[in-house]
Image (tube, rainbow, N blue to C red):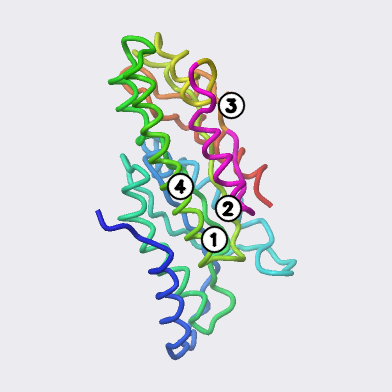
């Protein structure tokens, strides 16, 4: 797979600065871009476009002030949701990041200072880890299990660094927020593996760190990235459960949206 890189982002920026600014017609609002997997896409919410965490958060952000030094709220805040169910960090880099960067750059250099991207929210990484780790570790913590986890962690860490550095480079003024992951297994048919999920998410024993530690560490290394903590936030009643071992229901999405709201400025 050919990777989206900072070089491409810089090329887009250079092209945008050389282009003739577009004179805005009808006023356009600032933008909230959402990236990620099925959680960001609102999967299994009763009405994903309304009760998913992203649209819930977007409605709250409309009441928050936006723009550098702007005291007014963002009632016209738009939402560009690029999230795709089943997406991994590889998928986000290949399929979502180029469009998001193009939108950020186009709006930054279109001659309209009021329609820039103000917020970027991200949920990614669960699909990088879930399937491979369940396959390798369901029978217990073995050398094969640990090797699989560490291999997937290393690939995800590199991808997340690329994602966050790229976004920060093209959107230096936007607020970027990424969530850690909850443990949904207690609510589904894989409930006996709930301790394994805790270990993979938060580390311990043979794993010095977990998936959420990678998210926190990469965000800190890139700098000026808000980490939204959802580990331990949701109860069993907040998941779809049963045969679904991944997704929050409407109450879960509500709690995630609230966590973003409280973490973001």
**Labelled pair 4, 3 in contact (Cβ < 8 Å):** no
Image position of 172 (left or right of 45):
right
In terms of sequence position, does the residue under pointer 2 or pointer 3 come before the other? 2
In terms of sequence position, does the residue under pointer 1 or pointer 3 come before the other? 1
User: Which residue is under mark 2?
Assistant: 222
User: Which residue is under mark 3?
Assistant: 233
**Labelled pair 2, 3 in contact (Cβ < 8 Å):** no
Image coordinates for residue 181, horizontal then vertical, percent:
50, 32
Identify the image quadrant of residue 61. bottom right
**Labelled pair 2, 1 in contact (Cβ < 8 Å):** yes
Image position of 135 (left or right of 248):
left
Cα gap from disc 4 to disc 3, whole angstroms: 23 Å
Q: Residue at x 58, y 26 (%)?
A: 233
Secondary structure category for the residue under label 3: loop
**Labelled pair 1, 4 in contact (Cβ < 8 Å):** no
User: Which residue is under mark 1?
Assistant: 168
Is residue 219 a member of the stretch shown in magenta?
A: yes
Which region of the structure is painted magenta?
Answer: 206-229
Nearest the viewer among 200 and 21 is 200
Image position of 117 (left or right of 197):
right
Image coordinates for residue 102, horizontal then vertical, percent:
40, 69
Image coordinates for residue 73, horizontal then vertical, percent:
67, 63
Q: Residue at x 49, y 60 (%)?
A: 167
Q: Residue at x 62, y 65 (%)?
A: 173
Residue 160's mark? 4
């Amino acid at each position: 797979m050919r990777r989206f890189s900072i070089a491409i982002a810089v090329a887009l920026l250079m092209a945008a600065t050389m282009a003739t600014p577009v004179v805005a017609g009808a006023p356009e609002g600032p933008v909230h871009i959402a990236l990620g997997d099925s959680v960001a896409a609102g999967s299994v919410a009763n009405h994903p476009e309304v009760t998913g965490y992203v649209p819930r958060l977007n409605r709250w952000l409309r009441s928050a002030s936006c723009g550098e030094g702007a005291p007014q709220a963002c009632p016209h805040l738009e939402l560009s949701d690029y999230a795709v169910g089943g997406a991994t960090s590889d998928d986000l880099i290949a399929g979502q990041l180029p469009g998001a960067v193009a939108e950020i750059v186009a709006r930054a250099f279109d001659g309209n200072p009021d329609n820039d991207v103000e917020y970027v929210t991200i949920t990614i990484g669960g699909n990088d880890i879930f399937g491979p780790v369940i396959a390798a570790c369901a029978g217990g913590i073995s050398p094969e299990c640990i090797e699989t986890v560490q291999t997937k962690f290393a690939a995800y860490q590199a991808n997340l660094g690329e994602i966050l550095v790229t976004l920060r480079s093209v959107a230096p003024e936007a607020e970027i927020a990424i969530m850690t992951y909850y443990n949904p297994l207690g609510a589904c048919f894989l409930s006996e593996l709930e301790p394994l999920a805790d270990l993979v998410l938060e580390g311990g024993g043979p794993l010095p760190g977990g998936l959420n530690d990678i998210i926190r560490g990469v965000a800190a290394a890139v700098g000026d990235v808000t980490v939204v903590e959802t580990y331990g936030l949701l109860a069993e009643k907040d998941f779809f459960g049963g045969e679904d071992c991944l997704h929050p229901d409407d109450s879960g999405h509500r709690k995630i949206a609230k966590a973003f709201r409280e973490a973001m400025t």
